[in-house]
Amino acid sequence: MASKQGTQEDSWERAKNTWSKYVRLQDPVISNDKAFIKKEEMEDEIAKFGLADLRVVVNISEVQRAGLYPFLDIILAHEVGHHVLAPGNLITLARLNDFISGMFPRDIAGYVVNIFTDLLVNDFLFVQRGLPVDKVYKALKDSASKKGVITGDVDKFWRLYMRIYEILWRLPTGTLTTGVTPEIERDAKLSARVVRTYSKRWFMCLKNLAYIFKAYIPVGNVVLLKGLPLIDKVVAGEGGLDKLWGFASMSDDECYKPSDRQYDGELDDIFQGRRGKLQQGETNQPRLPTDYISTLVYIGAITPDDHIRALIQYYTELALPHIVPFPTIEKATGEPIHEGSEQWTIGEDVSTIDLFESIKESPVIIPGITTRKIVYGEDKGSEIEKSPVDIDIYQDTSGSMGDPACMVSYTTIAAFIIILSALRVGASVQATAWSGPNQAVSTKGFSKDSNEILRTILYYHGDGTQFPCQILERYDERKPSDPPVHIIVTSDEDISSMVSNYLVSTKSGIAETKSGYATLKKAMERGKAKGSLLLRVYTISPGLKETINKLEGLGFQMHSVSDWKNIVEWAREFSKKHFGP
């Protein structure tokens, strides 16, 4: 149960006012309930702040055990600082974590980011607001010393961390720590200068601090992660994924990620009194899907089982800037006209029976004999109505195409552009991810279920290449009144299977050979379809040329790209050129 006392409520108000009287946050959960603390995974934690739900949780039992209750105002002000100053929002936390993931394992990277944001928040509270944050760390050190957890590497990093604060705040040497070696003194001074020099350029600041901290944080040091006393931890909080729109692309600052195998010389500028040059990278470059997913899992925005939902958001974000109104056809609008009645037979929709007309036929209603239904015609108007065409998209997922969960797949971005554009105006989409023989995952026909369609596009086989002609047999079920279809096939050079023979199993289990060309021709006719072939080809062989000629004869248009990156622009221009307003 959350403990609510007047003094704690007053502490919360003072904490918010420390930053601004306009700060609006929900009341903190200050609890000593063991079951609640265990559920929040805070048995050894003092506090935590959720950036998505803006929720502060304080383990008051741990606060009292560490002798920090007199500093409750400062602890709460520190939590508010994570909302107001650093990291400020969930997407910045994710960017910072991913930025140094090349130098440290994910858990260590998150730990370094936590130290970095604490430095910024604590420095503001001490210097700008005059709060005695140093006393909080003295109490933390005393509590941790009693537990015996500050030893070895933990003690070495603690001395560096505390000496940085002493230098930043001009405290007498020994105020927060003792036993400072010349090496620690040198690195603490350099770290303090980094914080002062790059306090407004967080990624540069974090990178340079990471170079210094790396010597003090051995890889895989679980003891260090558990032993170093910290005020809190910053987490994603409930509903984290929805707050991360924008994370799929890298900002300018992130284009120069530090690596554990190389040093870029930034610290040399500080040694010599130079601020260094502000590097400019290529902005809005897609982040690798693997980095995207692993960062979201680590900060708690998603669970490992939630990666498909995250991938849908990733590719949707990359597609959104390119979405345009989707292809439509023009047809005259009309109104239904009552043209009389005709016999209703058994097997037809019961709701179409007209009882009045049936009783006029005979007072004794006999289904299929005396039952009647209304016949409607249509009065063609002069007003033009635009109707979207349906899309049937076939995504090659063979080994040569690459897994969209492991690499940036521009064919997947293009597919998302087309699909989302179609769904936006009410069109239906059939999506198929295909590879080798009998390797085709498809939606259940033409659908408007975005989740089903986008999940299908993300499916990856990684095998051979054989076009799923059997999916085209579904066109037998299309009605004459259904909208026209545009068939889009994305693949590399091997598309001969679109017009080759293929095997299907009959109901009796016997393999039957069918003509791919005949099936495709029939589907194009039934669907009133046009088609687009999007192929990555460098040279067109005689065999490929023959296949393309056959497909063009059925109504396909060939589009060749040498680099899959060009497909994004093609997907946008495709809509404008062929079906735009």
Image: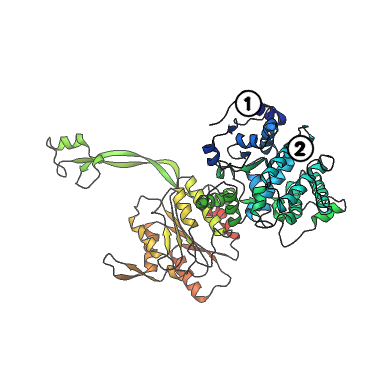
Nearer the observer, 110 or 516: 110
Cα–Cα gap, marks 2 and 1: 24 Å
* Residue that badge 1 annotates: 9
Residue 169's disc is: none
Can residue 96 be seen here? no
Residue located at (57% from left, 34% from top): 32
Residue 352: x and y in percent read 25, 40
Label 1 is placed on what type of residue? Glu
SS category of the residue bearing label 2: helix
Residue 134's disc is: 2
Q: In this view, does 134 lie to the left or right of 104?
A: right
Residue 449: x and y in percent read 43, 48
Nearer the observer, 446 or 373: 446
Residue located at (15% from left, 41% from top): 370
Q: In this view, does 182 lie to the left or right of 23?
A: right
Can residue 176 be seen here? yes
Task: Rate crowding at label 2 as few (under 14), some (14 to 19) or many (20 or more) other CA atoms within 10 Å.
Answer: some
Residue located at (68% from left, 34% from top): 68
Q: Residue furthest left?
A: 364
- Which mark sits nearer the N-terminus, 2 or 1? 1
Q: In which quarter of the image is residue 80?
A: top right
Residue 31: x and y in percent read 57, 33
Label 2 is placed on what type of residue? Asp
SS category of the residue bearing label 1: helix
